[in-house]
Amino acid sequence: MEPPEDLSAAALFDTLPVWHLPHGTQVAFGPVNASTPVSGSPSGTTPGGLPSAAPSTTARFLALLAIMVAGACGGLVGHAVTDLQCTDSCPVLAGSMGLIGAVLAAVGVGIVAVLALRAMAEWQTNELQQAARDHHPVD
């Protein structure tokens, strides 16, 4: 199939399969026209009007809450274990071990939270892509 003389995105979208489009051509889900916002536009919408793949605000807030709770628990455990092991009064050592425990626990839970949020975003993106494929099959 020969490409049309008019190399506008709308003409290419209507006549060529997706894998034959020239390099750098943006393709939206649906007809492309002047009123379709593109990525990076002030409105921040995608060409097909798809929502962002970023995790929801609630998910991010819960991840932050989990990191803070883990840090507090790690600090309490670090302080308590060091305080129990110390025969003399050693508040500096117990405090420093509490701080180390808090940092280690928060970093560990932070890594898990980031991985979970990325997995959520990937699952959401895959679902949106599958819905787009089902709605617009390529012949």
Image (cartoon, rainbow, N blue to C red):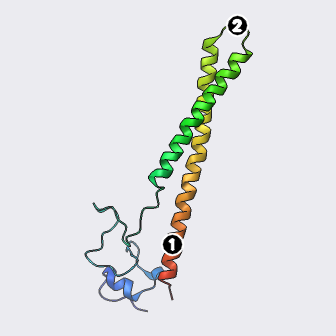
Give the farthest residue toward the left.
34
Q: Nearer the viewer, residue 72 or 35?
A: 72
The residue that appears at 51% across and 76% down in the rendered structure is 131
- Per the image, the residue denoted by label 1 is 129
Q: Which residue is mark 2?
A: 88
Residue 129 screen position, x and y as percent = 51, 72
How many labels were placed on the picture? 2
For this view, does 132 lie left or right of residue 70? left
The single residue placed furthest to the top in the displayed view is 88
Question: Secondary structure under badge 2?
Answer: loop
Residue in the foreground of this view, choosing between 104 and 9? 104
Residue with the most extreme bottom position: 1
Give neighbour class at mark 1: few <14, some 14-19, many 20+ (Cα, 10 Å).
few
Residue 43 located left or right of residue 100: left
Q: Is residue 6 above or below residue 69?
A: below
Compared with 15, 57 (above or below) is above
Considering only vertical position in the picture, is 12 above or below 77? Answer: below
Measured from the top left, where is residue 123 in percent x and y? Answer: 56, 63
Q: Quadrant of the N terminus?
A: bottom left
Left or right of 69 in this view: 22: left
At 55% from the left edge and 61% from the top edge, which residue is drawn? 122
**Amino acid bearing label 1:** Gln
The amino acid type of the residue labelled 2 equals Asp
Q: Earlier in the sequence, mark 2 or mark 1?
A: 2
Depth check: give the residue in front, 15 or 87: 87
